[in-house]
């Protein structure tokens, strides 16, 4: 069937200094949505890799929280760029194998933590705000007050919130 065809699809991303392999998986338990690499997440990763916007070492010592991280591309890149990252999603299982494959050394792996997060019923005990940067790719496919409140609750001055959505119907 078509859903089975999406299981086990490999994607390769080349960035300025890093190559990242992502395995998509829309099968099994949990959310199929988390098992796909969404365009908004790939767009955020390309944006963060732009040296004209973010010079080398920009992300070192920055704390980042990614909401709706899915398979983990953006979080993985930010960890490789030196940030301490909290990867969150309702279904984190889809990201775990990608994190382990791309952050193979203990030095890299300790830069990224993973926690399940439901914006409507958040368990804030696993988070450590305020974050320097909060990011979400393709999480804005509907007007979502809970996402807005959550982003504000995890930010502080001078936090930066960066959202990317490929849905042009939101205006």
Image: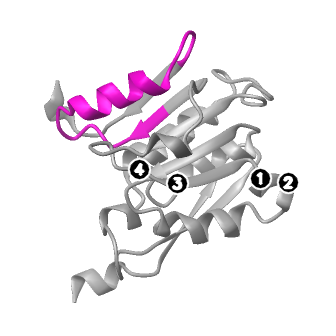
Q: Are marks 1 and 3 in contact (CB under 8 Å)?
A: no
Read off the magenta span: 135-159
Characterize the local packing of mark 1: few (<14), some (14-19) or many (20 or more) Cα atoms within 10 angstroms. Answer: few
Of residues 29 and 118, the one drawn nearer to the viewer in this rendering: 118
Q: Are marks 2 and 1 in contact (CB under 8 Å)?
A: yes
Secondary structure, mark 2, is: helix
> Which residue was labeled with disc 3?
115
The image shows residue 123 at horizontal and vertical percentages of 42, 46
Q: Quadrant of residue 50?
A: top right
> Which residue was labeled with disc 1?
110
Whether 145 is among the magenta residues is: yes
Of residues 125 and 91, the one drawn nearer to the viewer in this rendering: 125
When the figure is inspected, residue 113 is found, relative to residue 95, above or below; the finding is: above
The image shows residue 36 at horizontal and vertical percentages of 38, 64
Location of the C terminus by quadrant is top left
> Which residue was labeled with disc 4?
117
Q: Residue furthest left?
A: 169
Q: Which mark is residue 107?
A: 2
């Amino acid at each position: 069937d078509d859903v089975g065809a999406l299981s086990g699809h490999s994607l390769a991303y080349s960035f300025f200094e890093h190559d990242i392999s992502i395995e998509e998986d829309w099968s099994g338990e949990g959310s199929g949505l988390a098992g796909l690499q969404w365009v908004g997440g790939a767009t955020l990763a390309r944006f963060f890799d732009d040296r004209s916007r973010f010079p080398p070492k920009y992300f070192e010592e920055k704390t980042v929280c990614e909401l709706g991280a899915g398979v983990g591309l953006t979080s993985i890149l930010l960890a490789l760029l030196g940030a301490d990252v909290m990867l969150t999603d309702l279904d984190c299982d889809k990201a775990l194998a990608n994190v382990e494959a791309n952050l193979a050394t203990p030095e890299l792996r300790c830069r990224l933590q993973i926690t399940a997060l439901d914006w409507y019923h958040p368990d804030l005990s696993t988070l450590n705000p305020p974050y320097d940067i909060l990011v979400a790719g393709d999480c804005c496919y509907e007007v979502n007050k809970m996402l807005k409140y959550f982003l504000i609750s995890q930010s502080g001055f001078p936090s930066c919130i960066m959202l990317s959505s490929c849905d042009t119907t939101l205006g």
